[in-house]
Amino acid sequence: MKKPSLAEACQCADLTCDGAMGTQLIERGMQIGECGMLWNAERPEDIKSVHQAYRSAGCRLITTNSFGGSRSMLERHGLGDKVAEWNRRAAELAADVAGPDGWVIGDVGPFGDFLEPMGDTTAEELEGIFREQISALVEGGADAILVETMSDPGELCAGIRAARAVTDLPVIATYTFQKSAGEFRTMMGTKVAEAVKAAYDAGASIVGANCGTDLSLADYIELAKEIVAAAGGRPTILQPNAGAPQQVDGDIHYNATPEEMAGLARTLRGLGIAIVGGCCGTSPAHLAAMAQA
């Protein structure tokens, strides 16, 4: 039987996306500041082991190891010529694990600078940067494109337009919000309703949030309510951190337990979030509890 499209599945199934990649690679020996994309070429079995751990936990959406895979980000490591090869490989590795009833989510993170007038990059230039990366993810077998952890609606919408220019696959778009004076806003000051509308208007299939500066589990519940209200019945996604980060002996720790994240996942589903996953500090143990919940 043919696998339904991700958009179709959102209407009829409880879907769990996977969790953090970076912290899992650090546990396997990656150094802080090292280019994680390098592991797609030099340590592919480690990448697959992370994907497999999440797949075994019950995650049906497997996200490629390509968060920093745009040319602008890879050039910081002197690796700008590896965009096509390493993004294509990222999708292939995820596809090896996702299986016939899973989906490969091609991950596109921020390009690492600001758009005009705060920066020097135009929207047209940024769309070209994103098109290059997204094209390679599609070639490698992505089932959907995820434009994530965005603070500027202009950057997020450039990513959506770039995806729409090269593929008809579903486009998932997620912002990162912070809470100030009782309101959720992006770093650029955009409120939830405005941000969500901009993403859908640009052509996103599924819209929501991931990460979140210093948000508690209770904050994610309130954020979910605003996202669902702004979406107006269209599919939504939320990938929270494992609680607010705490600094212990100079290191950052996320202290929410798998049981606490499972409770959060149940609540988010009850509020109407179609896809629940994890971000910073989450592990396969967290996602297994969330998927089961």
Image (cartoon, grey):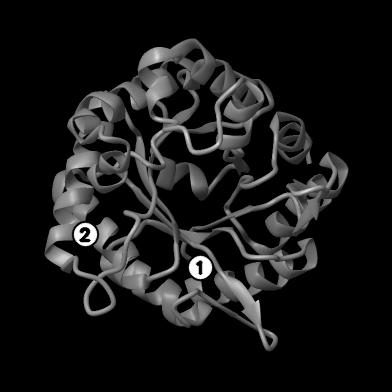
Number of numbered discs visible in the structure rendering:
2
* Image-based side of 271 in relation to 174, left or right: right
Residue nearest the viewer, comparing 7 with 138 = 138
Instruction: Measure the C-alpha gap from mark 2 to mark 1.
Output: 22 Å
Q: Which residue is mark 2?
A: 161
> Residue 118, percent across and down?
28, 77
Query: Which quadrant holds the C terminus?
Result: top right
- Is disc 1 placed on a helix, strand or loop? loop
* Image-based side of 232 in relation to 135, left or right: right
Name which residue lies at 23% across and 79% down: 117
Q: Amino acid at mark 1?
A: Gly
Name which residue lies at 73% across and 69% down: 219
Q: Residue furthest bottom?
A: 181
> Residue 224, percent across and down?
64, 67
Query: Which quadrant holds the N terminus?
Result: top left
Image mark for residue 252: none
- Is disc 2 placed on a helix, strand or loop? helix
Q: Residues within 10 Å of mark 2 (few under 14, many from 20)?
A: some
Q: Amino acid at mark 2?
A: Arg
Residue 100 appears in the picture as rendered: yes
Name which residue lies at 75% across and 59% down: 244
Residue 1 appears in the picture as rendered: no
Q: Which residue is mark 1?
A: 233
> Residue 68, percent across and down?
38, 42
Q: Earlier in the sequence, mark 2 or mark 1?
A: 2
As drawn, 51 above or below 165? above
- The quadrant where residue 91 appears: top left
* Image-based side of 258 in relation to 192, left or right: right
- The quadrant where residue 27 appears: top right
